[in-house]
Image (spheres, helix red, strand yellow):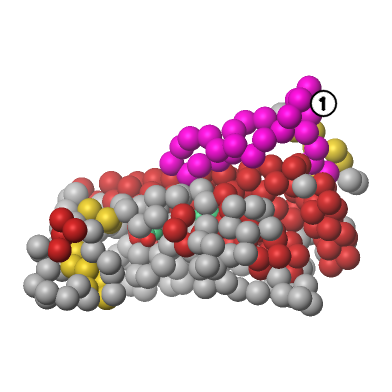
Amino acid sequence: MMQVNWLNFSVPQSFIWTIAIYPGLGSSPLGEPAADQEKLDPNTYFHENNLLSILTTLFMAGTDTTSSTIRWAITFMVLKPEIQKRVHDEIDKVIGSAVPRIDHRKDMPYTNAIIHETQRFANILPMNLPRETTRDVFFQGYNIPKPYKDLLFEAEVKAFVVFKGTYIIPLLESVLHDETQFEKPRSFYPEHFLDSEGQFVKRSAFMPFSAGRRVCVGETLAKMELFLFFTSLMQKFTFRPSPEINEFHAKRATGLAIPPISQKICCVSRI
Ligand code: HEM
């Protein structure tokens, strides 16, 4: 017998759905459309312009970043066939011909390390997002360049004052390529994220999503996407440089989220 699952209007189905239906939620079994006056008033949260603005931000922040990272991962696989082979072996062993699922990740330390090392080494948002301080901020123990010493109210330099309204560009490069944190910061070296037994290890300096209160809101989603897209592609293809190319490079292009330069590759089916 066919079973029909009717849409339950008292349970939000998605972000867009919630805004489109508001404020009828809970007030009627079918819900009611957003009150006309709310939809028309640009000063209300539920005005259509806000929905468009939020969705544009999510798409811009969420697509270029993930696709650039995947392009870097494929670039590194082309450049390092021996590493690509180990990823293929792990996929064959853990996933086989099944559709990759996020719970495969815990059993795939090598592939997980490759994705982390790709993000660390590629550093696609080297200048992060610019921010502005909303109040004076004190950084302990900083060495202050001479011209700024006059601004300090202690004779002995013990703190660095960042005044309210200062434009801040936190360089992610300073942590992702920090030689005190990573053995070979300027090389693609998956062992940065593996222990001596080959198990995945987290590193506190791994901050491609930034840190603190304004850390990337899409971090969890992005990590799932990267794993699923990368393993799905690697499950089906071996990546090689196109025969027309004399030398294959890992060079940076330009863009908001920096991808590698475009180069032709061959996707050889593994199935
Ligand atoms: C590889 C993938 C991604 C990387 C490397 C990345 C990285 C970042 C970084 C570094 C920031 C700045 C954080 C800060 O200012 O301290 C950021 C912000 C943001 N990200 Fe991502 N992101 C990725 C994927 C995503 C995805 C999939 C989404 C959503 C679907 C997303 C949504 C956002 C939004 C909305 C912001 C702005 C947050 C704010 O203004 O506070 N990101 N991301």
Looking at the picture, how far across and down is residue 7, in whole percent? 53, 65
> Residue 8 or 65: which is nearer the viewer?
65
Asked if residue 15 lies left or right of residue 35, the reply is right
> Residue 270 or 35: which is nearer the viewer?
270
> Residue 249 or 53: which is nearer the viewer?
249
Q: In this view, does 234 lie above or below 252?
A: below
Q: Magenta stretch: residue 269 in it?
A: no
> Residue 60 or 16: which is nearer the viewer?
60
- What secondary structure predominates along the stretch shown in magenta? loop
Residue position marked by numbered label 1 in the rendering: 243
Asked if residue 11 lies left or right of residue 244, the reply is left
Q: In this view, does 153 lie above or below 184?
A: below
* Structural crowding at the residue carrying mark 1, measured as other residues with C-alpha within 10 Å and reported as few (<14), some (14–19) or many (≥20): few
Residue 55 visible in the displayed image: no
Q: Which residue is at 19% across, 49% downward?
A: 42
Q: Which residue is at 78% across, 22% downward?
A: 244
Asked if residue 34 lies left or right of residue 178, the reply is left
Residue 178 visible in the displayed image: yes
Question: Residue 153, located in which quarter of the rendered image?
Answer: bottom left
Extreme right residue here? Answer: 271
Element under disc 1: loop
Amino acid on which disc 1 is placed: Pro
Looking at the picture, how far across and down is residue 191, in whole percent? 71, 65
Looking at the picture, how far across and down is residue 106, in whole percent? 72, 74
Looking at the picture, how far across and down is residue 212, in whole percent? 37, 70
User: Which quarter holds ligand 1?
Assistant: bottom left
Determine if the C-beta at disc 1 is less than 8 A from ligand 1.
no
Asked if residue 194 lies left or right of residue 44, the reply is right
Which region is colored magenta?
238-263
